[in-house]
Image (cartoon, rainbow, N blue to C red):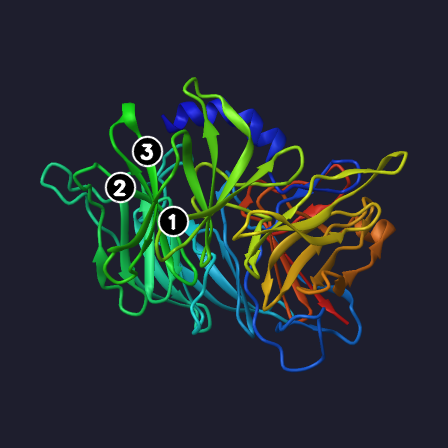
Amino acid sequence: MRIVIAAAVATVLIVGGGVWYANGDGERRNDVRGSAGTDGKSGREAADGPGGERVPTDTRSEVAFALPVPVVTTDVKVAGSWLTDTVYVKPGVASISGYDIADGTRLWTIALPGQLCAASHHTSKDNRTAIAFEATKPRTTKDTVPCTEVGAIDLTKGKLLWSRSVSGGTAADDQKVRFDEVTLSGNTVAASGDKGGAAWGLTDGRELWKPQLNAEKCADVGYGGGETLAAVRRCGPYESLYWEVQNINTATREPISTFRMPTGFAYPSIVSTRPLVVTAKLFSASGDVSDSRDFFSIDEKTGKLKTIIPAPRDRYVVDCTFDEVEGCRGVVVGNDRIYFPTEEHQVGTEEFVRTNEIVSFDLTTGKPTSDKADAGVRHAMYPLRMDGGNLIAYREPVFGEGSKQIVSIGGDSFTPVTLLASHVRGSTHDTECAFSYGAEILYTHGRMFMSDGMIGKPRKTSTGERTCLALAYTTV
């Protein structure tokens, strides 16, 4: 059923979805995903809310380092990137490496028995995170190896702390369970796949639960991490399939609250766990998909619906994939609001001059607020993450210029303040790195890191830009 529905809406996702950032002529676009930063200790406070990011004395930036793309003969997934106060961490080919945030010097490398296939977006307070990977390397490029191993890594020390797997749990099914996603909440690592979900303690790898079906034939098909842990559950037989979202106890898997998705809404994605915000598309009996992606604001304590916020694709840029529960990009929750980037639109009467805005909706009432941050003429802007009461956003460059920017938008005034701006222009711009769909952007304390989530054979783009595994900018 997943394959049939996904095929039916593939065109919608390709054309209407995706936080794809155009560079003027639409040649190259970047999909951005944010990551939490740390509190700063000096400098001026950005914007007007209580946040950790400060405005550098000089916001102009330069390229600090670029990581070359490993030589491969086929496409390899290298999703995920993380930051500590001193280390930038990026997966490679069957490995994860940590680099000095200042100059890109490799500090450590963790060798994996197989390729990485999933990585948590979340980290613990002591800089640990979770990954899923293959038990072995494929013998040939045509072979596939299931993703059965889940582990925890220390991002500071560069160590794989433990790795675990689980079987199907019955005499008839003693094969290792395949996992597609992994996330982190508190001391709980949770992974999910077609047969359900499993969880382990972050510090010791102790098994907390494994895949199982209840009387209603419900199975966890994905988890959302962060401040708390939420599960997406697929329930019932094929002919009467329905979906649930549960706020769950991270130690026992017992549900704290349950919200049943309305009839017709399928494959929910979790945008935030506290407050609990999920999104899904409405499918008709014939498999047709709605043009609007609806966002459900739910009381995580009671499971009661607060409000529904529609996000029509002709008005807002919303990218949430079918096959990844934590796969929403460019949509951020904070200040009891949800922030959306609007679709790019024409400025005045000039046909090729475009811009967009970031706006918000109240998660209690579902009504639009007065928030509106303009990207500016010939620019577009997309939210990355919260920084206290402020919103950190990426302001995309004008085509042909390297004027990438990171801004902090005040939670009260909603006025953008520049934190970092690159000003590479002309022929020098052609030597910068281009990133494909799925690229991530991390920012903290005057440093911006861009990286790809998939690598392939070395190539050059139509504009002459080269590909990189990652590129770092720092304010001068």
**Percent of width and height locating residue 42:** 68, 82
Judged left or right of residue 433, residue 174 is left
Viewer-closest of 263 and 377: 263
Name the image quarter holding the C terminus. Answer: bottom right
Viewer-closest of 239 and 321: 239
Callout 3 secondary element: strand
Query: Are the residues at dot 1 and dot 3 in contact (C-beta closer than 8 Å)?
Result: no
| Among numbered discs 1 and 3, the one appearing first in the sequence | 3
The residue under label 3 is 242
Viewer-closest of 16 and 35: 16
> Would you say residue 67 is visible in this rendering?
no
- Image height check: is 189 above or below 354? below
Under mark 3, the amino acid is Tyr
Q: CA distance from mark 1 to mark 2?
A: 21 Å
Farthest residue, direction top: 286
Task: Assess disc 1: are there few (<14), some (14-19) or many (≥20) residues with their C-alpha within 10 Å of its C-alpha.
Answer: some
The residue under label 1 is 304
Query: Are the residues at dot 2 and dot 3 in contact (C-beta closer than 8 Å)?
Result: no
Residue 287, quarter of picture: top left
| Among numbered discs 1 and 2, the one appearing first in the sequence | 2
**Percent of width and height locating residue 53:** 65, 71
**Percent of width and height locating residue 110:** 42, 62
Mark 1 or 2, closer to the camera: 1
**Percent of width and height locating residue 438:** 57, 45
User: Which residue: 49% across, 56% down?
Assistant: 91
The residue under label 2 is 219
Under mark 1, the amino acid is Lys
